[in-house]
Image (cartoon, rainbow, N blue to C red):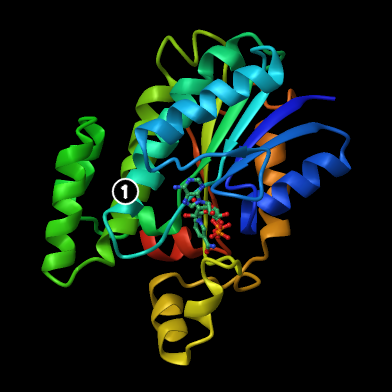
Amino acid sequence: SRTYLVTGSASGIGKATVAHLREQGHTVIGADLKDADISADLATPDGRIQLVDRAHELTDGRLDAVIACAGLAHFVPRTIQVNYFGVVATLEGLRPLLAAGTDPRAVLLSSVASIHPADQTIVDAALAGDEAAAVAAAQAAVDRGEGYAIYGASKQAIARWLRRTAISDDWAAAGIPLNAVAPGTTVTPMTEPMLADAETRAAIDAGIPMPLHGHARPEQVAPLLTWLTSPENTHVTGQVVFLDGGADAVLRGDNI
Ligand code: NAD
């Protein structure tokens, strides 16, 4: 049995992943805004510190795996703070606990939205680690009526961070696989309100075509997150694995 920390554990993909891991007999510490073992707001510096401090207290400083699901899709600057800076702080902050664990692994959530054209001002500021500049660029997108672009930019930035970070000394040389899963449209409390509106649903389906099996359920994402963070995964690292019913193959085609 392994000890996992899952962020975004109170809803959707995170909640389904916690259930899947517990069914397999693993110990899981959930973190979320509320209804979790650790209550922390990962959009804030204080919340990020709380997450790591509480994780130390609850685990004696050892974790075997981290699954970073916490995310936001609102058309506001907070989305870049949670989806990029919150995820980076989660993984960097918990890395020392992973280094003390057994067969340590980590995975984060990107999205098919990461391959849509993105606002590079937001992406570049995020990758530079400049949260104030990223928030300002996101606010500028909101002011232009393009707040929808923040989400895709956050998911592209975190995928690029992952590619760089997975091969660094802190991760690869320390023996810790680090990957992303990029779901297509998955039916969760994040997307249910949008999918309930016929016009919005049609726009989503046009942007993320899923010829195989259509929209996913969170229970269908959990097993991949579990495998990527299992001891069986010895050599998959730095990958963005698309669990998307073929959306990436449709959208990127030959551009691999
Ligand atoms: P969800 O809204 O059901 O769950 C997300 C959870 O993250 C919620 O419990 C929420 O409280 C938590 N969270 C949000 N902001 C937080 C903060 N500041 N601090 C701590 N926790 C916070 O969404 P979901 O669909 O399960 O999404 C999980 C992940 O998968 C997200 O990163 C999302 O962007 C990604 N994703 C989802 C879809 C989809 O179609 N649902 C597609 C691609 C990627």
Q: Nearer the viewer, residue 91 or 208?
A: 91
| Residue 6, image x, y percentages | 63, 38
| Residue 236, image x, y percentages | 58, 28
- Name which residue lies at 68% across and 27% down: 233
Q: Can residue 245 be seen in the rendering of this structure?
A: yes
Q: Nearer the viewer, residue 186 or 244?
A: 186
25 is higher (above) or lower (below) than 18? above
- For label 1, the crowd category at 10 Å Cα-Cα, with few meaning under 14, some 14 to 19 and many 20 or more, is many
Q: Quadrant of residue 235?
A: top right
Some atom of ligand 1 lies within 8 Å of the CB belonging to the residue at label 1: no
Q: Can residue 254 be seen in the rendering of this structure?
A: no
Q: How many marks?
A: 1
Asked which secondary structure carries label 1, the reply is helix
| Residue 134, image x, y percentages | 20, 44
Give the farthest residue toward the bottom: 198
- Name which residue lies at 50% across and 29% down: 50
- Residue, disc 1: 80
Side (left or right) of 164 relative to 71? left
- Name which residue lies at 11% across and 69% down: 144
| Residue 84, image x, y percentages | 36, 41
Side (left or right) of 98 relative to 158? right
239 is higher (above) or lower (below) than 189? above
243 is higher (above) or lower (below) than 42? below
**What kind of residue is marked 1?**
Ile
- Name which residue lies at 53% across and 85% down: 196
**Quadrant occupied by the N terminus:** top right
